[in-house]
Amino acid sequence: MRRLAKTTIAAALSWSGAHEWLGRRQPKTPLILGYHRVVESVAATQGKILPGMTISQRMLRAHLEWVARRYRIVSLDELGAALERREPCGKLAAITFDDGYQDVHDYALPVLQQMGLPAAVFVVSSLVGTDHLPLHDELFEIVKDVSGPQARRSMPRSLADALSACEHDPRGGPLAMSHTVRALLALPAAKLTPILDDLRALGWHNVPARELVTMDWTALEAMQRGGVTIGSHTHTHALLDREDDDRLIDELVRSRSVLEAGLGRPVHHLAYPDGRFNLRVARAVATAGYKFAYTICDHAVEAAPLLTIPRVMLWEGSCAGALGGFSSSLMHCHASSVLPYPSRCDDDHGTQSQVLPC
């Protein structure tokens, strides 16, 4: 019923044109879509991957076909040049993927090449060619291990206390586990780091399943040859607004250095992990030599518009209609930023916030 109601309302807004004047995205700003995982079947990954992180290859193609009919899809370099010249960008779009998962190479790249579209991937440089996990995936694996009938018994006290503070429900299923992961990610680094250290000391690091593998240098080079821009997602997926100045600069500079050395091309673009930024972080990004940086909401730093470029983050269910197929009406509402409603981001990031002008 909820999906039917959502689809019906979206259809009414789209048919009437109300999505255009209700939307938060300004008419001269570009449409930049953001994704994480691209898989063959979302149903096959349920319970294995954080909810809201995946889109099927079939649904991704439907998204891109919709965008390509209404916008000119360009590379981030071309888009950045237009933004620097302060040109109207309302008819431009870009496609981005965060974290650098192997499945983006396996399932997104073929679609992009078949359609002749450019895109960008933001990579966590310390994970390239390793079996380590992004922090959110590591926490999800940990929460899965302490939930349900197969829960581990040797839980360190630091984790038990944190789960209690997060009001974790071990029988709540994937969505409840996802809420717990978000709560753990919100902990100050001084509290979260010792928990992870305790777990690693107990041997809680597992070689990731195929669904969690990130790309190695060979895959990244193939992406680059296929017309995909490689950008930074920091060195360790650090939540930048939580880091002190020295760590902040190190995360930014080291990632750019590693990626440029490994790929032989300059890295101008960065996406903020978990969308965490503020004016201090934006200034550090500029100091580290990046020209453009991207958020996951429509908040922007007035003093640094090219370093707080909004994106629309999408996944399988975001534009799925009442029967589960692609809904053009829902896509219209996301593209104009009517959805998500209310706004997913209640944080003004400690800045004077406004919708970013082109």
Image (cartoon, helix red, strand yellow):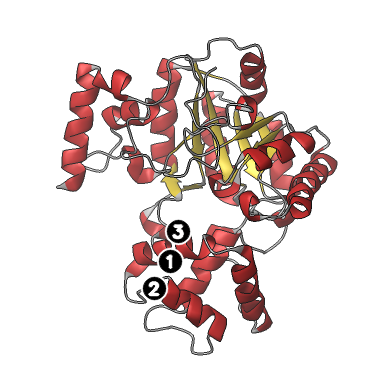
Disc 3 packing (10 Å; few <14; some 14–19; many ≥20)? many
Q: Residue at x 59, y 50 (%)?
A: 101
State the residue in front, 18 or 96. Answer: 18
Q: Which mark is residue 168?
A: 2
Does the image show residue 209? no
**Residue 47: x and y, percent?**
40, 64
Q: Which residue is mark 3?
A: 50
Relative to 208, does residue 2 appear above or below in the rendering?
A: above
Lower position in the chain sequence, tag 1 or tag 3: 3
In front: label 3 or label 2: 2
Q: Which mark is residue 125?
A: none
Lower position in the chain sequence, tag 3 or tag 2: 3
Lower position in the chain sequence, tag 1 or tag 2: 2
Relative to 214, does residue 170 appear above or below in the rendering?
A: below
Amino acid bearing label 3: Leu
| Label 3, label 2: how far apart the Cα atoms are | 16 Å
Amino acid bearing label 2: His
Quarter location, residue 8: top left
Does the image show residue 163? yes
Relative to 187, does residue 301 appear above or below in the rendering?
A: above
Q: Which residue is mark 1?
A: 180
Amino acid bearing label 1: Thr
